[in-house]
Image: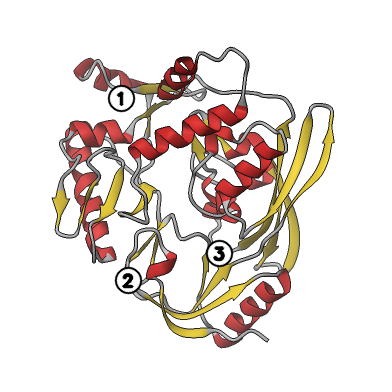
Amino acid sequence: MIQPQTDVDLQPYNSFAIAECAERLVWVERDAELIEALDLAAEQGWPVTLLGGGSNLVLAGPVPGLVIGMRSRGRRLLSRADGFAVIEAEAGENWHALVNWSLDLGLSGLENLALIPGTVGAAPVQNIGAYGVELCERFDSLDAWDRQQQRYCRLDAGQCRFAYRDSLFKQEPGRYVILRVRLRLPTRPDLRIDYAPLAAAWAATGLSRPDSRVVAELVCAIRRSKLPDPAVLGNAGSFFKNPLVEAEQAQALLARFPGMPHYPQADGRCKLAAGWLIDRAGWKGRRQGAVGVHAEQALVLVNHGGARGAEVLALAEAIQADIQQQFGVRLEMEPQRLGD
């Protein structure tokens, strides 16, 4: 029988290193333990919060009810045929470790997503993406517990409703708990290196044959050069989504800022670089008390030590208001806000 701990400090369990307490916390390793924890919360009327790697959240205050930490482990090769392999990993597995494991198997497809923090179970929620690749492109299916219907379910890519940094799991928050994820990966290198910094880094290697391991190493090097290590400087990675705007608005902004990075989308809209907007507005390296904008990457907010969630959110809101005023563009936070 599970025994939740009470008044647990969550600072060690969130990459922003914000000190807030969970009213109750229980770690689960198996499906049965998860369901037992959910049943206990339902019986007691406790709200439930799921905790994976803690890399995409801002603790705005104490977290009431029951926090369930996902610690399920396991990964396996399910099939290999016709130029593709299907791998499966439990929700509590570390994402970057899974990427490295897939490369050890000689598989391609995840190298651009190397070094993204967090767990496998959190990856579909955000539809994680980097350097020109999104999870949905490599996705096969997942198993989840449907809290509404009290049953197990298997969801394919269409049912997950993937979009840019979006999914069914954000559209219907709290309904599903992801248990394990399956990915369909090429058995031969299928490199995506058209993202400018990655293309330049690849060209500098002088290699002509495709090599997924080398691409993964380049991605890691680029990320480390731009993003602070959470163990040294608390952060949640990219804090704002790259905004999508209508083509007309993008053209108007390009008339004002000819060098503005922009990426036309299949639906006719245009994706802008949030980091460029924040940098152009003069926020890079600025500090407000214990929080600030990273000096090397304007898309990252950092905890200089002892920051509270309210301070992080206040800085984020100030940036949002300024970008709206200067460019007419609304920035949306990526991290989830938890706590009162």
Question: Tag 1, which secondary structure?
Answer: helix
Q: Disc 3 residue type?
A: Gly
Q: Position of residue 308 (x, y in %)?
A: 26, 66
Q: Is 324 drawn above or below residue 171 in the view shown?
A: above
Tell us which disc is closer to us: 2 or 3: 2
Question: Tag 3, which secondary structure?
Answer: loop
Q: Position of residue 288 (x, y in %)?
A: 14, 54
Tag 3 or tag 2, which sits nearer the N-term? 2
Residue 161 visible somewhere in the drawing: no
Residue indicated by mark 1: 249
Residue indicated by mark 2: 19
* Quadrant assignment, res 106: top right
Horizontal relation, residue 179 to residue 13: left or right: right
Residue found 49% across the figure and 18% down from its top: 205
Residue indicated by mark 3: 174
- Which quadrant would the N terminus be assigned to in this image? bottom right
Tell us which disc is closer to us: 1 or 2: 2
Q: Is 82 drawn above or below residue 313 in the view shown?
A: above
At label 3, counting other C-alpha atoms closer than 10 Å, the crowd grade (few under 14, some 14-19, many 20 or more) is some
Q: CA distance from mark 1 to mark 2?
A: 41 Å
